[in-house]
Amino acid sequence: MKCGLSDAYKNDATSNLFLKILMALAFIVEEDILHLYSAIVQHMLPPILINDPRFAEFMEYYEQEWVCSTTRPLSDWNVYHVTDHRTNNMLEGKHSMFLWHFGPHKSLWKFLSLLITLSSREWKKFLIHQNGKPPSRRRRYHVDREREIANLRRMYVDNSITALDYVIKMAHRMAGQCFNDDE
């Protein structure tokens, strides 16, 4: 959704955190989402966004399409119970690879030729892994972040931290997320 909030997201730390908190709602149990969403909107709105009509438009969209949607239930976007790939990092990595190889514009034949080459490479990797060779080691940064997230989740499950604290801490760990007005 294009709503013009990228400046607030990039330049105002409070707005940045608020928008990340909305994204982090996906990490809590479904039963807590509506209550927590209401509390966040009532008590944590950044002053810079309160009277901004673009923000009002975004919040209306967010509520209708995500929080209170009749066509997209919370269970469709909630990842609390997902234990493996809790993010779309793998998809983002493939997207970056395609952009790097293809660039923004290629002719159809160059695109198809390169797609066949990349498909062949991925198939070879799959066969190697299927035959018992372990995948390459993951970067320590990613392992450490996953460990942090797992510890936060455990604290949330054990009621050592509140749902709000959990969402805020998850939002702080979403440093790599971007808010793009072009989408």
Image (tube, rainbow, N blue to C red):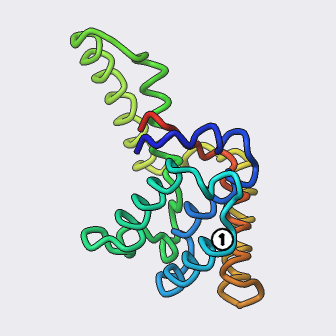
Q: Residues within 10 Å of mark 1 (few under 14, many from 20)?
A: many
Of residues 17 and 95, the one drawn nearer to the viewer in this rendering = 17
Q: Please give the count of numbered marks on the rendered protein.
A: 1
User: Which quarter of the picture shows residue 37?
Assistant: bottom right
Residue 134 percent location from the top left of the image:
55, 49
Looking at the image, residue 26 lies above or below residue 12:
below
**Which structural element holds mark 1?**
helix
Residue 38 percent location from the top left of the image:
55, 78
Q: Amino acid at mark 1?
A: Val
Residue in the picture at 73% in, 67% down: 169
User: Which quarter of the picture shows residue 2?
Assistant: top left
Quarter of the figure with the C terminus = top left
Residue in the picture at 65% in, 46% down: 137
Residue in the picture at 51% in, 65% down: 84
Looking at the image, residue 136 lies above or below residue 71:
above
| Residue that badge 1 annotates | 167
Of residues 36 and 126, the one drawn nearer to the viewer in this rendering = 36
Residue 128 percent location from the top left of the image:
43, 41
User: Which quarter of the picture shows residue 151?
Assistant: bottom right
Quarter of the figure with the N terminus = top left
Residue 31 percent location from the top left of the image:
48, 87
Left or right of 16? Residue 90 is left
Residue in the picture at 49% in, 46% down: 90
Q: Residue furthest front?
A: 51
